[in-house]
Image (spheres, grey):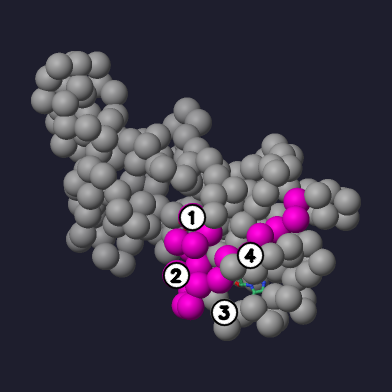
Amino acid sequence: MLLKPIYKCSICGKYIEEPVHCGKKAILLLDSKRRLMLSKLVSGLLRHYPWEIGISLDREGWISIDDLVNGIKTKWKNKHLYQWVTREHIIALAELDPKGRFEVSGDRIRARYGHSVLVRIEYEINYPPKLYHGTSISKLNSILKQGLKPMNRLYVHTTISKSDALLNARRHGTPVVLEINVECLRRNNIPVYKAGKTVYLVPYVPPECIARVY
Ligand code: HQG
């Protein structure tokens, strides 16, 4: 994953990915390396292990941004690497996330998808024309037999972007991209939820709804 640095406009205060804004040099807020490490940590904490920094998510996955910052700086096992973190870094990270991984509302933040922790987020039902899922060739036989299951997460994660599916597949081994027949999901009364910019969640994809294997 390649992430651009995040800057803050010295005139209008907007968070941006370009070093110049409003005709002036902007202030560097997060370089690429810090942005990536903070994004991975916050994703992990809000999806899988909030207790590692002594916080718990509410029913809908929310946590106060101040509690998150404070927990990272005082309780995270590698806290010495994160003493620079402020609430502004968290807000900028969430606002500019390319996949819409995070949602900020007032003083709170939550992950939009990816959870293994039990949360109930109300998503909009949305059946796009096509969906893809990236996985590895070693899992293919089992998937074609049993369908796509959420495994350790609350939902099966799919995407409208074939290239995102391929990127995700590469995480798992020899990449395979599955095309899902969305009409088939609808016929089977299986809901599809829009969770991120390109990420859609499905409780289960039966084998007969897997249309093609790339
Ligand atoms: C596989 C990234 C055997 C499934 C991505 C996958 C995503 C089966 C693995 C998000 C199976 C679970 C989540 C079956 C499913 N038999 N294997 N019946 N059913 N599997 O990591 O979808 O960048 O929990 O194919 O873009 O890879 O982090 O899920 O290989 O949206 O924001 O079980 O993570 O988003 O793996 O990735 P994961 P995922 P972020």
Counting residues from the N terminus, which is met first, the one under dot 1 or under dot 4? Answer: 1
- Relative to residue 124, is residue 59 depicted above or below? below
- According to the picture, the residue beneath numbered tag 1 turns out to be 163
Counting residues from the N terminus, which is met first, the one under dot 3 or under dot 1? Answer: 3
Q: Which mark is residue 205?
A: none
Residue 88 can be seen, yes or no:
yes
Location of residue 213 by image quarter:
bottom right
- According to the picture, the residue beneath numbered tag 3 turns out to be 137
Q: Amino acid at mark 2?
A: Arg
Q: Is mark 2 within 8 Å of ligand 1?
A: yes
Give the class, few, some or many, for how many residues have Cα within 10 Å of label 4's Cα (few <14, many ≥20): many
Counting residues from the N terminus, which is met first, the one under dot 3 or under dot 2? Answer: 3
Q: Amino acid at mark 3?
A: Ile
Counting residues from the N terminus, which is met first, the one under dot 3 or under dot 4? Answer: 3
CA distance for labels 1 and 2 = 13 Å
- Residue reaching furthest left? 25
What range is drawn magenta here? 163-182
- According to the picture, the residue beneath numbered tag 2 turns out to be 171
Callout 1–callout 2 Cβ contact below 8 Å: no
Q: Which mark is residue 178?
A: 4
